[in-house]
Amino acid sequence: TGSAEEIYQATCSAPVNIAVIKYWGKRDTSLILPTNDSLSVTLDQDHLRSVTTARADPSFGDLSSYPDADAAAAHLTDRLWLNGEEELIKPDGRLRRCIDEMRKLRAAKESKDPSLASLSKWGLRICSENNFPTAAGLASSASGFAALIASLAALYELQPEVSSSQLSRIARQGSGSACRSLFGGYVAWQGGKEADGSDSLAVEVAPKSHWPDLHALICVVSDAKKGTPSTAGMQRTVQTSPLLQHRIKEVVPERMAKITEAIQKRDFDTFAAITMADSNNFHACCLDTSPPIFYMNDVSRSIVQLVEEINRASEAEGLGKKLAYTYDAGPNAVLYAPKENMPAILQTIRHYFPSADFDDTFNILGNGANAS
Ligand code: 2P0
């Protein structure tokens, strides 16, 4: 509660997540409901993150003074800046939907407790920054929408009454993969069955503390903006790829069960085998799309060969796999390995890729979105 002179502002950060069972395809493009379940690992916020500040103030506009939400929107009551540039909040866009859903939750809270300040009626100013290249296949939309939802949830003081899974349902409507960044550690996005998306949300498979020994290494092959954006690319795959239908029905359900069990048992060999197989199956579906989509390049493929060779040599000695690769909608490799293997892996990668512009970032497992 408070007077109108009080400042209502919250800042939250959210990390990137990298899927080991990939989301690729929607059964509902408006609500963002996926064609299959997916599972990811949330990375450490120290390296890749979005930070968002949201502020509500009556001076930004009072929604109750407009006849309807569209009229209020036309008067720019809500405004958003991404990396310093103003982003238009389109009337039927994803940002609009996320903000509206959050505002509805606040309005419900205010109607239960009339002593609360009327934040739901005030305009918003939102500022978001990524500390890494946007749209380079490094999951910028995932951390961005997760940070947006987390900052509005903090501003509107929605938790703990509203759970993180409930918030993930709203983040999902911003960008599918964003729902997974509301949690740390090992996270599943249950695709759900309902047409209204009520059961399409993220759940924690295991916290970071369950298997903290797993580390990730991101090999930035290129930070250029990707050629085919995920949103358009995945629907082209849905419309044209017979292989995707096989993936949805036969491949993913079994892998979800097996990798969940591998995480529970901290079984790196199984985790690595499924992670690599699923990355390859996803890129095969991209290739099976008409016209085909290519995200990996020659450098990406040579990293695959190097990882396969390291694992082959290790297995020949009776030791297990040393590491796993996975690629998203871009050429950059994410390598997962037990922490103790990382120094040798880095050394080998640097030996084979001495090029100065081949950047790398060392990441450990992180927590989900949180307030600061
Ligand atoms: C994933 N990707 O599971 C997969 C793997 C890319 C490859 O989620 O349309 O940016 O915003 O829901 O979430 C990229 O898709 O797409 C993605 P929208 P999103 O991480």
Image: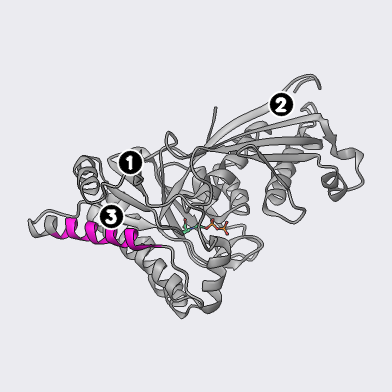
Q: Are marks 1 and 3 in contact (CB under 8 Å)?
A: no
Q: Quadrant of the N terminus?
A: top right
How crowded pointer 2 is (Cα within 10 Å; few <14, some 14-19, many 20+) is rated as some
- The location of residue 41, given as percent across then percent down, is 40, 48
Q: Which residues are magenta?
A: 296-312
Lower position in the chain sequence, tag 1 or tag 3: 1
Q: Amino acid at mark 1?
A: His
Label 1, label 3: how far apart the Cα atoms are: 19 Å
Please tell me which residue lies in front, 170 or 359. 359
- For the point 60% across and 51% down, the residue is 169
Q: Secondary structure at mark 1?
A: helix
Name the residue that disc number 1 marks. 210
Residue furthest out toward the front: 356
Q: Main secondary structure of the magenta part?
A: helix
Name the residue that disc number 2 marks. 8
For discs 1 and 2, the disc positioned in front in the rendered view: 2
Q: Secondary structure at mark 3?
A: strand
Q: Amino acid at mark 2?
A: Tyr
Q: Which mark is residue 324?
A: 3
- The location of residue 289, given as percent across then percent down, is 48, 75
